[in-house]
Image (spheres, rainbow, N blue to C red):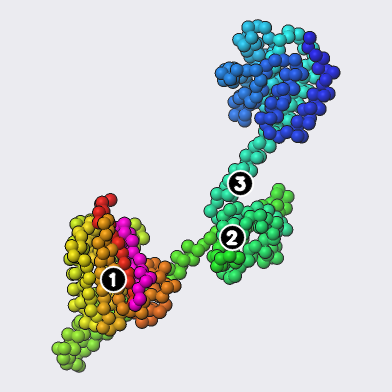
Amino acid sequence: MLPDFRIRQRDYLLEISRAITQELDLDKLLARILHISIEMLAGQVGFIALRDNKGDWSISASIGVASPFLGYLELLLSRVPEQDNPNNFGLSEINQIVKQITRMASFGLLTGVGLPLIVHQRVIGVIIIFRNYSGVFSANDQTLLQSFADQAAIAVYNARLYTQIDKERQKLNSILDSAADGILIIAPDHRIERVNPAFVRMIGIPADALLGRRHEDVIMFSKKNEGMTLEEAESGGWPLVPNALLNVEGDLKCPSCIPLPVEITYAPLMNAEGTLINIIATIRDITRFREADELKTTFISVISHELKTPVALIKGYVSTLRREDADWDPIIIKDSLTVIEEEADHLTELIENLLDASRLQAGALSMNLTDLALAGLIERVAQKFQTQTTQHKIVVDLPPNFPVIMADENRINQLLSNLVSNAIKYSPEGGEIRISGQNRPDQVIVCVSDEGSGIPSEDIPFVFDRFYRANSTKRTTKGAGLGLYLARAIVEAHRGHIWVDPKTEKGTRICFSLPKELKQK
């Protein structure tokens, strides 16, 4: 006989009330409600179906229902009208479905009952219980059952709301953790409440050591370039409006690293009453932008100087030769024309290097691979430069049968010319320029050495950078700092490597390796 659930109603309602306050895991809560429902109604089988915001039904918890049958149950529930008004909820359709399921699942031996879950005048689900008992529920019994269902509906609503909030929190955490920029969430009293991994990497302090600290104890500038700090802005009344953004740029102090160039944007988060809840600080590493600005300044400075010198020489010699009041000796004319030609060649070389640097930056450095007799090319480059200088001796030192490789002849010629030209620039009068080579099984190695003052050890990591020139040579030697930059680009385009030999006892020795076999891309 069906237990008198009116006697136990208080216990069940207390149990559901405890579930509302104690259990926010939706799956566990639904299993708990279903278990209580089956026990209260002396049932054997049951399930809970929930309806989402789109009106679609899904079986969210079940006891005693075969898994293949659950999909069919969802199909039957999809016939229930989608009215949000519980007064129009299709209880008749639910009852028909219950009867249909009862007949199909139990061959008429079981009876069932459906209890709608209603919250805020909206049906969010239904509890359906089957039992091996044919008694009829009285009106008072149904009222008690619906009271239980209402309590269960509140518990389900709260759990679904918590689940949704938890998913949004996880999504927000994922966004913060994956952001490339540093992010701080700051309380109105300037205590740091949240910090993302990007900022931890920037400043080199563990997240646990940052939480709870004051903003001004963490964000400290060794040099402030633009804008007001957060403290300065707040002293002037910031934020006056909810969407007021504050920007500051400067070098951020870092305990274990050099000052980091950053741009910080502060955004206020306010409630509907205009009270400040949080301040969101976005910290962006602008090292690359700073380097780009410095590179642009260097480019303008170097190029203006390098263009100005040959143009001034050419103009000076031409103006002198054009004087009508002078009768120049043929030797003077010849020497003057030689200078003009050399400076014109220097201009041409500079322009070609600039064009190649632009092509390289645009990823358009062309390559035309052919069989290249490297020994013959090295000999031709040495002879060409030997005719241009009488103050240096250029020596070629290659092993016999130096191999033929796959390479772009014009680019390798440019590479060797840049290295030999550099060696001549930095070698003293009477110094020797030596081009040597090694034949390895899969590659060849070529080195160009001079007897100059050498490259300071602190400059070696940067000599292949664009526009870089060592401080010790800027005033004494011409150049735009593009020769070695282009040399590295050519070698890497051939899938080789280039380096400065740090073991040289005297002068500078720059080596590069090239593979013997290289397929055209």
What's the residue at 59%, 61% (across, down)? Answer: 203
The answer to which of 111 and 376 lies nearer the viewer is 376
Vertical order, 76 against 121 (above or below) = above
The image shows residue 321, relative to residue 403, as above or below, that is below
Residue 184: percent from the left, percent from the top?
Answer: 63, 55
Looking at the picture, how far across and down is residue 185, in whole percent? 65, 54
On the image, the x and y values in percent for residue 219 come to 63, 63
The residue under label 1 is 448
| SS label for mark 3 | helix
Q: Is residue 340 visible?
A: no
Amino acid type for the residue under numbered disc 3: Asn
Q: Residues within 10 Å of mark 3 (few under 14, many from 20)?
A: some
- Residue range of the region highlighted in magenta in the rendering: 481-506
Report the residue marked by disc 3.
173
Which residue is at the front of the view, 13 or 354? Answer: 13
Q: Is residue 499 left or right of residue 414?
A: right
Secondary element under disc 1, as helix, strand or loop, is strand
Mark 2 residue type: Gly
Residue that appears at 65% across and 17% down:
64
Type of amino acid at the residue the image marks with label 1: Val
Q: Is residue 247 above or below residue 118?
A: below
Q: Which mark, residue 66? A: none
